Image (spheres, rainbow, N blue to C red):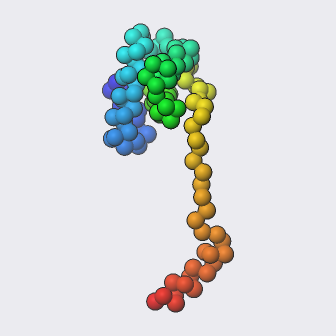
Amino acid sequence: MKEFTEYLQSRNLSKTTIEIYLRYVNGFLDWYAKEPINCKKKDVLKYLAFLKNKKQYQNLTRKHILLAINHYFTALLKNELITSNPTAFLKIRGTNKKQLTTLLYWKNLQSLPTIIITAL
């Protein structure tokens, strides 16, 4: 786990995010109970199904867990402990995408200097 923690730190993740990712990955590794280098895509899919059906985790939570597991296997790949990432191309369906909203339109931005000057 030390190498994984260093990998997460190199990605400039916050301390809280690193702690959460470590907890998620440890949960997966406890469930898997085998050498992680032997993990296949079907094993990750079984874990995600376990989280959905037995633990009744929502899709967004499972998406975050999958992201943490993906980082873990990416770190293993980077350290050449595995040859492929079993989480590659896996996604959780049914999670809402964030929609960007327009706060200011161009015409409002153009009049902004005038508003600031008159306010002074």
Above or below 30: residue 114: below
Specify whether residue 9 is in view.
no
Above or below 51: residue 108: below
- Viewed as shown, does residue 29 lie left or right of 112? left
Specify whether residue 7 is in view.
yes
Identify the residue at horizontal 60%, vertical 31% (top origin).
93
Q: How many marks?
A: 0
Q: Quadrant of residue 35?
A: top left
Identify the residue at horizontal 37%, vertical 16% (top origin).
30
Which is more toward the observer, 58 or 46?
A: 58
- Viewed as shown, does residue 119 lie left or right of 9? right
Which is more toward the observer, 83 or 49?
A: 49
**Image position, residue 11 (x, y; %):** 43, 39
Above or below 5: residue 105: below
**Image position, residue 112 (x, y; %):** 57, 79
Above or below 93: residue 102: below
**Image position, residue 99 (x, y; %):** 60, 51
**Image position, residue 31 (x, y; %):** 40, 15
Identify the residue at horizontal 49%, vertical 20% (top origin).
53
Which is more toward the observer, 83 or 46?
A: 46
Q: Quadrant of residue 113?
A: bottom right
